[in-house]
Image (cartoon, grey):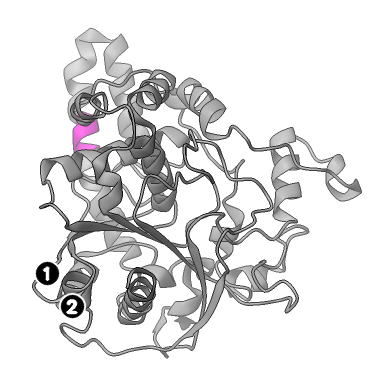
């Protein structure tokens, strides 16, 4: 997307600005300090790890629904809010215990990352975390939370921070670039669509954003790295220093190696569960796959008028024209395009030589969660970090 993107959505099919790179990754051992150049050469003082959808503290919006109910029932407000707080406190640990490192960033992943980079940069899981809901407001709220965290611990002049995110966390990064690039006027516009939230992190960030009419100084310090992020919201190129997208991909057409196997008509179940063509979730979760909670439905409708601006209706052929409802019809038409790559940033399409590690009942970790789980595994972190570091060193001298 261009400078001054103003939240416009990426178009389908995408046309990457930078040539796509194909890589075959081999498993690498963990060697302490092997990625120390992240700090010494790239000037990165902080790495924040951000999980994707459904791995947060309120993935189904249940705690949020209880708080909404409490506002309309004063006599029950205290017990309802208490119930929401307890639910939110327990959800993230429970979900993380089940998912482990398959599509989820764990404390072990964070600790391994720290050993690989040495004493610096400081590596951390985003805390407090985000809800993990699958809709626009949740991702916007995550973007605001990240800005607040960056403001709470300012970087020394000339130093940088890396955001390392999985799945839709990357789309929150896309919103973040628009927030940082757009200045006060764009902040007011997106806040109005979101219903002018008054939570603490929104108030903190608002106070800061209203000081700037152009790009915020934070933008020039951000290295953004996404893993398995679906192609959704547009990126503002004034909102970051550098941007990499790592996606699990297997070439099915040598003449168009950057496209994934079209997902409509549907693949066989074995192709999907076995990740025959790479990360099926990343390729599937295009516009039209959000699921809004009831209390956020109107807000999401308002936000989508901004965040999905520029997204043209797809063309329909006989195989999609009669599908109902219209949302599913449009999604099927888009899935025919084989969209894998983002317009902006460098797309690193990676395949994996199997590590030999399996999970019950004998599934190679490279195939877990329909190809979406490998990106967050501790086993593949050394290879992913090596790839990212080498790429950034080449691009940034």
Q: Please tell me the numbered disc located at residue 185.
A: none
Residue lying at the far front in this picture: please name it: 397
Does residue 232 sit above or below 311 in this rendering? below
127 magenta-colored: no
From this viewpoint, is residue 66 visible?
yes
Choose the circle earlier in sequence order: 2 or 1. 2
Q: Residue at x 47, y 59 (%)?
A: 345
- Across and down, in percent, residue 227 comes to 42, 63
| Along the line of sight, the residue nearer the viewer: 25 or 76 | 25
Q: Residue at x 32, y 68 (%)?
A: 101
Quadrant of residue 336 within the rendered picture? bottom right
Q: Which image quarter holds the C terminus? A: bottom left
- Across and down, in percent, residue 9 comes to 56, 40
Q: How many callouts does the rendering have?
A: 2
Q: Residue at x 47, y 62 (%)?
A: 228
Does residue 219 sit above or below 313 in this rendering? below
Quadrant of residue 122 within the rendered picture? bottom left
For label 2, the crowd category at 10 Å Cα-Cα, with few meaning under 14, some 14 to 19 and many 20 or more, is many
Left or right side of 210 for 291: right
- Across and down, in percent, residue 2 comes to 52, 44
Q: Are marks 2 and 1 in contact (CB under 8 Å)?
A: yes
| Along the line of sight, the residue nearer the viewer: 195 or 255 | 255
Which residue is label 2 attached to? 36
Left or right side of 385 for 348: right
Q: Residue at x 56, y 26 (%)?
A: 305
Which residue is label 1 attached to? 120
From this viewpoint, is residue 60 visible?
no
For label 1, the crowd category at 10 Å Cα-Cα, with few meaning under 14, some 14 to 19 and many 20 or more, is many
From which residue to which does the magenta span run? 83-87
Q: CA distance from mark 2 to mark 1?
A: 7 Å
**Regarding mark 1 in the picture, which secondary structure is present there?**
loop
Q: Main secondary structure of the magenta part?
A: helix
């Amino acid at each position: 997307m261009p400078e001054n993107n103003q939240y416009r959505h990426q178009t389908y099919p995408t046309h990457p600005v930078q040539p796509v790179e194909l890589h075959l990754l081999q498993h690498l051992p963990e060697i302490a300090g092997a990625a120390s150049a992240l700090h010494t050469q790239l000037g990165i003082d902080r790495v924040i790890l951000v999980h994707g959808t459904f791995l947060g503290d309120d993935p189904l919006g249940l705690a949020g629904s209880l708080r909404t109910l409490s506002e309309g029932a004063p006599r029950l407000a205290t017990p309802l809010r208490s119930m929401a707080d307890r639910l939110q406190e327990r959800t993230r640990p429970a979900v993380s215990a089940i998912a482990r490192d398959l599509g989820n960033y764990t404390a072990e992943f964070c600790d391994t990352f720290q050993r690989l980079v040495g004493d610096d940069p400081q590596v951390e899981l985003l805390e407090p975390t985000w809800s993990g809901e699958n809709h626009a407001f949740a991702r916007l709220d995550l973007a605001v939370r990240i800005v607040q965290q960056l403001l709470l611990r300012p970087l020394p002049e000339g130093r940088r921070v890396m955001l390392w995110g999985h799945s839709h966390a990357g789309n929150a990064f896309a919103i973040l670039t628009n927030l940082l690039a757009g200045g006060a006027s764009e902040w007011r516009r997106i806040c109005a669509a979101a219903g002018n939230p008054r939570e603490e992190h929104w108030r903190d960030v608002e106070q800061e954003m209203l000081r700037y009419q152009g790009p915020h100084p934070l933008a020039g310090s951000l290295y953004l790295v996404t893993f398995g992020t679906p192609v959704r919201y547009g990126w503002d190129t004034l909102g970051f220093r550098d941007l990499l997208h790592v996606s699990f991909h297997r070439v099915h057409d040598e003449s168009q190696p950057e496209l994934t196997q079209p997902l409509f008509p549907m693949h066989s179940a074995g192709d999907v569960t076995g990740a025959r063509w790479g990360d099926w979730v990343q390729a599937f979760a295009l516009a039209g796959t959000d699921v809004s909670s009831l209390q956020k439905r109107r807000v999401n409708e308002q936000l989508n008028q901004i965040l999905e601006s520029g997204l043209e209706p797809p063309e329909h052929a006989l195989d999609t024209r009669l599908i109902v409802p219209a949302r599913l019809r449009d999604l099927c038409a888009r899935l025919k395009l084989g969209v894998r790559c983002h317009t902006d940033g460098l797309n690193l399409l990676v395949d994996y030589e199997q590590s030999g590690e399996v999970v019950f009942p004998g599934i190679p970790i490279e195939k877990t969660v329909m190809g979406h789980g490998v990106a967050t595994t501790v086993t593949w972190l050394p290879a992913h970090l090596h790839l990212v570091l080498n790429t950034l060193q080449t691009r940034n001298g």
